[in-house]
Image (tube, helix red, strand yellow):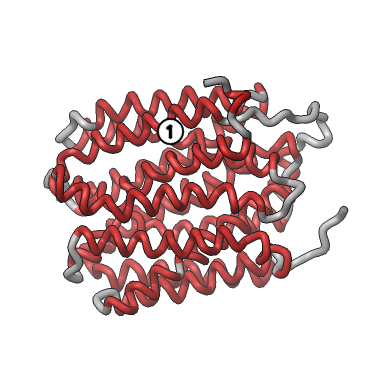
Amino acid sequence: MSVSRVPPLAALAAFYFSYFAFQGLFGPFWSLYLEALSFSPLQISVLMSLSTLARIVSPVFWGWMADRSGKRRSIIFWTSLASAACFVLVALQTGFWGMFATLALGFFFWAAALPLAEATTSQLTRSQPGRYSRIRVWGSIGFVCLASIGGYLLEWVSLASLPWLLFGLLSLVVLAGWTVPEAAMEKRSRQQDSMLATVRQPRVLALFSCCFLLAFAMGPYYSFYSLGLKEAGYDKAATGWLWSVGVMAEILVFWQMPRIMARVSLERLMLASLLVSALRFALIASLLAVPALAVLAQLGHAFTFGVHHAASVGLIHRMFSEQQQARGQGLYTVASFGVGGSLGGLLGGALWQHGGVALTFGISTAAALLGAAVCVKWLRPQAVAH
């Protein structure tokens, strides 16, 4: 299929769908697969954190390559292909160090594609505020499709088939990556391309601090939420549906984001995401065994991810020049899903055996509240120059 025959935004929607379909199966069920291989809670937290640890190094390196070469699409395709190949090796591992090595390599390539796709989508939708979210919502749809049927699918084919199912989804990412468009960039200038000067701005530092703290709070969620549900008495199907409830709320808010952004500043959306997230994690920490409140907490994912991510991408697109977009989105991935998510997930592994859900998600609540304080102090709304 010729890339030119695929409408640019439709191609990006297909990429998001397949990319997050992989996450929809990996996120809720990979910790259960690792537990079935008899890994300890600490080993599980380390292995689950590899996807976030990869986002510390990978996005900066590949973002730099993309901004220098201007070939985002090629990098998206080839890194996705390499990631799929690595998951063949992952499927053959049963020991900790073999699993560690193959997952680490696979996620180094896997983490490259998303920031580049985000930069392309932001660039192609820059004239229509909020349109980005209408494209990004297809990632949430892909996630919820696999999360909602994943429990039933694994009951049917067995948990041991999970790595091969994930390989199949990564193969779809490769096919979608081939159709992603190349967004042309203006010629760079030294003055425009002062990346260090941009990053040193107080508002940029405050933004990345908020992103770090919310991702830190989310780290234990990605690693231990499913295990917490299991301890509270939920089966695999209920686990998949609870993950899906969160993403369905995320889908709704993504679809409404053009209207929301027309009325509320990005800075206020950031603050709302942090405050609602603190409430959500407090409910998980204390009342996870109550089904109605478990559902209510999952509805908060509309803010924890949907509102937060849309506000973050919008603010980064505003704060970084066109020639800095891939690196800007890469740094966002590093600060949030990379450093923040990794540290949060690793701390969750250390705390889980001592305090379980209550202690682990209590720390998440505190981190989200600290992020809200940073937002109030240093990330206030300001007029945008036209």
Look at the numbered disc 1 and give the secondary structure of its residue: helix
Q: Amino acid at mark 1?
A: Val
Rendered image quadrant of residue 258: bottom right
> Quick check: 333 left or right of 356?
right
> Quick check: 244 left or right of 185?
left
Question: Is 69 rendered above or below residue 33?
Answer: above
Q: Which residue is mark 1?
A: 173
Between 358 and 258, the one lying in front of the other is 258
Question: Is 275 rendered above or below residue 159?
Answer: below
Provide residue 276's location: percent of width, then percent of height: 50, 73
Question: Is 218 rendered above or below residue 359?
Answer: above
Between 257 and 362, the one lying in front of the other is 257
**Residue located at (34% from left, 58% from top):** 347
**Residue located at (34% from left, 60% from top):** 243
**Residue located at (80% from left, 26% from top):** 187
Provide residue 89's location: percent of width, then percent of height: 25, 26
Question: Is 143 rendered above or below residue 243?
Answer: above
Between 196 and 17, the one lying in front of the other is 17
Between 170 and 353, the one lying in front of the other is 170
* Residue 210 can be seen in this image: no
Q: How many marks?
A: 1
> Quick check: 49 left or right of 35?
right
Residue sitting at the far right: 386
**Residue located at (58% from left, 43% from top):** 331
